[in-house]
Image (cartoon, helix red, strand yellow):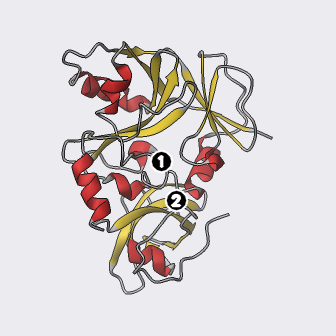
Amino acid sequence: MTQIYPTDREVLALTGEDAPSFLQGLVSADIAALADGSAAWAALLTPQGKWLADFFVVRDGDRLLLDVEAGQAAMISARLMRFRLRSKVAMAPAGLAVTLGWEGAPPAMGLAIDDPRTPEAGFRLLHEPGEGPAATADRDAWDRHRIALGLPDGSRDMEPEKSILLEAGFDELSGVSWTKGCWMGQELTARTKYRGLLKRRLCPVAVEGPLPAPGTPILDAEGAEAGEMRSGTDGIGLALLRLRAIAAGAALRAGDAVLTPRPPAWLTLPENMPPSVPPSMA
């Protein structure tokens, strides 16, 4: 049965003849390459290359729809419009709701798009409020699904003006383009990739014991710092871990809980990491 989760996310509409080129120079994904009815996962960074927000950009005819975290909608709109200058663009709430679905086909209603990160993630449905499909799942069910896949959930898993884009898998999950030309924060992001400067990654962990609160320090068997907890639910969580802690696959500790890294198949580690990487979480 298809799992259906109605979210509290918001949708912004970016209109005007310059909309694609305007957004192309500001976010990490290739907006110019978007076909009608398709989506890109994109991040908005500071000029210094630190994460501010991420969202899904959907090409819907002559407009671009931004599927954003509700609590960040006003900030995203204000930040983007700072750079409007003489560009012929406008941004306003689209008045649409967002419903997520997985383990089945989307219903024949609204605008259904495949999640651009990985096929296993499912689909996103943009529709008029009150006209979406009936819920069959709640946020905990969605969290279990997306965490097992290693998918971050915006500000629950990343810190504004601190997080580095590549820590969250944007490279492997098609959230960053290396060929489209300049965009805000590109320099630090590219330097991190090509100089091998990345030291930590968001990674799923199996949790035995009480679920650690976000921000809880994670220690290895010797008591050395190995990372910190992010979001989680029902025996599973995302943790920002040092690369060697992920590669070793050994049990870690956060408070009274024991954590075991379960990196997804798409997560790549440097070639000089130990070869014994545990299998993905089922």
Q: Are marks 1 and 2 in contact (CB under 8 Å)?
A: no
| Three-letter code for the amino acid on which mark 2 is drawn | Gly
Q: Is residue 214 visible?
A: no
Q: Is residue 73 above or below residue 218?
A: above
**Mark 1 vs mark 2, CA separation in Å:** 22 Å
The N terminus appears in which quarter of the rendering?
A: top right
- Residue 268 placement (x, y as % from top left): 47, 66
- Say which residue appears at 37% left-offset and 58% top-offset: 167
What residue sits right under mark 1 in the picture? Answer: 174
- Say which residue appears at 54% left-offset and 77% top-offset: 277
Q: Is residue 141 above or below residue 245?
A: above
- Residue 202 placement (x, y as % from top left): 43, 60
Q: Secondary structure at mark 2?
A: strand
| Three-letter code for the amino acid on which mark 1 is drawn | Ser
- Say which residue appears at 65% left-offset and 42% top-offset: 122
How many neighbours does mark 1 have within 10 angstroms: few (below 14), some (14-19), or many (20 or more)?
A: some
Q: Which quarter of the picture shows residue 16?
A: top left
Q: Nearer the viewer, mark 1 or mark 2?
A: 1
What residue sits right under mark 2 in the picture? Answer: 237
Q: Is residue 36 above or below residue 269?
A: above
